[in-house]
Image: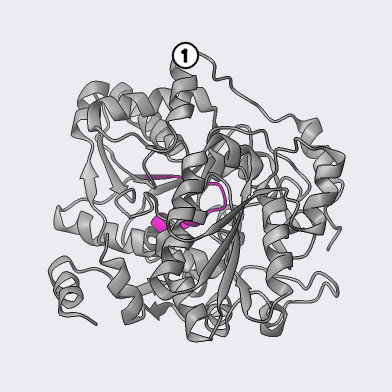
Amino acid sequence: MSDYTKILLEEHEMPRRWYNIVPDLPEPPPPPLHPGTRQPATAEDFAALFPKALIEQEMTQERYVDIPEAVLDVYTLWRPSPLFRARRLEKLLDTPAKIFYKYEGVSPAGSHKPNTAVPQVWYNAQEGIRKLTTETGAGQWGSSLALACVQFGLECEVWQVAASYYSKPQRRTMIEIWGGKVHPSPSEVTEFGRSLLKQDPDHPGSLGIAISEAVSQAVADPKTRYALGSVLNHVLLHQTIIGEEALLQLAKVGETPDVLVGCTGGGSNFGGLAFPFLREKLAGRMNPTIRCVEPTACPTLTKGQYRYDFGDTAGLTPLMKMHTLGHSFIPEPIHAGGLRYHGMAPLVSHVYNLGLVEAIAIPQTECFAGALQFARTEGIVPAPEPTHAIAAAIREALACKASGEEKVILTALCGHGHLDLASYDKYLRGEMVDLDLSDAAIAEAMKDVPEIA
């Protein structure tokens, strides 16, 4: 560990451990199942996809996991990330509420995704892996993995959802700047991709399809592994550095949140912020309302079913007990590309099913309206994904105005929108429309979900 890293750790109290919520839950989460036998998956079942260390983290019952020194060293490029109070937004809303936001857009990739990309690449490098494959939606994860791979000398190959690949070319360029190779998904590279393009040459793609393509390429090469940017336990584990830092920062100013809101797509940003606070709530040290916020076009928690389903469209991955819209579900190409996933992280799904957190869905025009209020007061242009949390925070702040309550509201601004300005342009021109997923569309997609008791 460099002297500079040591100074940062000492001066800023940057956490040196990730937090695993599983030991603190009142009921253990249901285990993943082998896609063939439908029996609980073993470490060996994950060996073709992930290095041993990450498989151990996926299954660990330890409450805390030490962050390796090499990972801490890279973290200091942007961590600790700042916690801001949105005083100007509070003034605009004329609310007695205090709004705090943890800003993850200060990372080199502009989002929270490097928090897990860096350790995932480092653990793979320690086991002699030469190349990582992955999927990406809006591009934050793909660019973050490319950034991490170049830090540790690994190759990076990315399948980007076609709707985002063509609408967000700057994300593709960022991946390529850091040495990554990018394909639109579905692609001509894999058999599964070719089969979908044969049916529909203009297929918009989905995260589930991109996962299938990346996984199929990883399992074909013993020196290649797959990296996932959300959903799995080890990913949420790495992201808890967000919430652990926020706890320290709020303690310094003597504040405790009454309400915590976070956008939810696959669940990593939400889990990363919320789980350390949920630990404190379960221990009786605070009692915040914790609320997931998702798009109405992809309402996994609020309209999906809690059951075992595949994490990818082709059915290559283990089955996970999660809130799902069905692994064959193809979401509309909304502007929050990072929230267009058919399932929700098993751990987030589990705590929601236990009633420990709430969930709401907000249409994208309300989200972008809130984003403009935020940008014009706080100065930061948010990525489309966290606009959902901003809209929820504004709703809560206006409720405080109506009631006179002086609540403390906390959220995570998980990335900036500098490469998402086309979405803002569409909103400003009045061309953005709200999409509400019908029950019929969900029922159709759920037909393919396995029946597992």
Q: In which quarter of the image is the N terminus?
A: bottom left
The location of residue 211, given as percent across then percent down, is: 67, 57
State the residue at coordinates (48%, 45%).
Answer: 171
* Above or below, 355 relative to 201: below
Q: Can residue 268 be found in the magenta stretch?
A: yes
Front residue of this view, candidates 275 and 266: 266
Q: Mark yes or no: residue 257 visible.
A: yes
What's the residue type where badge 1 is placed?
A: Arg
In the displayed structure image, the side of residue 215 where residue 252 appears, left or right: left
Q: Can residue 390 be found in the magenta stretch?
A: no
Q: Which residue is disc 1 drawn over?
A: 429
Counting every numbered tag in the picture gives 1
* Above or below, 225 relative to 296: below
Front residue of this view, candidates 341 and 200: 200
In the displayed structure image, the side of residue 389 where residue 30 appears, left or right: right
State the residue at coordinates (67%, 68%).
Answer: 30
State the residue at coordinates (70%, 63%).
Answer: 320
Q: In which quarter of the image is the C terminus?
A: bottom right
The location of residue 278, given as percent across then percent down, is: 42, 59
The location of residue 101, given as percent across then percent down, is: 29, 44
Name, please, the residue furthest toward the top: 430
State the residue at coordinates (31%, 62%).
Answer: 285
Mark 1 crowd level (few <14, some 14–19, many ≥20, 10 Å Cα): few
Q: What stretch is highlighted in magenta?
A: 260-273
Q: Mark yes or no: residue 323 visible.
A: no
